[in-house]
Amino acid sequence: MTTRIPAQTAFSAVLALPFGKFGIRIADETISELIFLPPETPLIPANTALAIAVAERINAWIEHPRIVLELPLSNRGTAFQQRVWQALRAIPAGEVRTYGELARTLGTAPRALGQACGANPFPLVVPCHRAVGAKGIGGFAHASDGYLIAAKRWLLDNEAKPANEMHSTKHAQ
């Protein structure tokens, strides 16, 4: 299966993070999208002041995942998706909720909740990786294997570490 790499020209940066490549798209001084990318995606240095600041904040969050990652996000998503994304942001780092638990809290079906998670344009800021299946890790960004599930596992493992075991190395931008 060939992995399609989104058009690089639209990225304000492509970062190499411990879990893989991660793209930043900026429009009108807000983040229009954050996206997990295939491993073969070429790096792109941050090319605007905002992209540099976003890359720095993401790297700081990787080092200390219990800080809340606040970034200037564009207004995206339906009212339902925004409700789901807000519920995800309320889950503390180091904790998870099942799709079923979140669905009951929001009065919706787990499948609808999973679709809203998969449509999340701001992973890390909206921590969709904290939503898991009742019998395991569940899917991630509409995937059930490959680099996306590996990223979800890394993020959950990183957030589960005690504060005194957090990373102390810098990551490439």
Image (spheres, grey):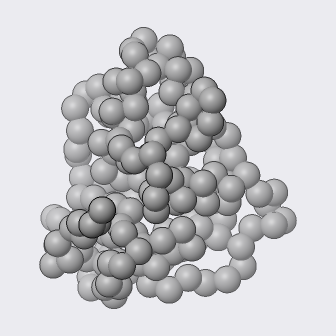
**Vertical placement of residue 77 versus 68, above or below:** above
Identified at 34% across, 24% down, the residue is 112
Identified at 33% across, 34% down, the residue is 116
Q: How many marks?
A: 0
**Vertical placement of residue 83 versus 8, above or below:** above
**Vertical placement of residue 146 versus 53, above or below:** above
Identified at 46% across, 79% down, the residue is 16
Left/right of residue 157 with respect to residue 8 in the rendered view: right
- Residue 73 is situated, as x and y percent measured from the top left of the image, at 31, 54
Of 95 and 69, which appears nearest the observer? 95
Q: Quadrant of the N terminus?
A: bottom left
Would residue 128 be seen by someone viewing this image from the given angle? no
- Residue 140 is situated, as x and y percent measured from the top left of the image, at 44, 46
Q: In the current view of this chain or complex, which residue is farthest to the front?
A: 1
- Residue 19 is situated, as x and y percent measured from the top left of the image, at 54, 68
Identified at 73% across, 52% down, the residue is 160
Location of residue 26 (image quadrant) = bottom left
Would residue 47 be seen by someone viewing this image from the given angle? yes
Q: Quadrant of the C terminus?
A: bottom left
- Residue 171 is situated, as x and y percent measured from the top left of the image, at 56, 82
Left/right of residue 131 with respect to residue 165 in the rendered view: left
Location of residue 81 (image quadrant) = top left
**Vertical placement of residue 18 versus 88, above or below:** below
Left/right of residue 67 with respect to residue 21 in the rendered view: right
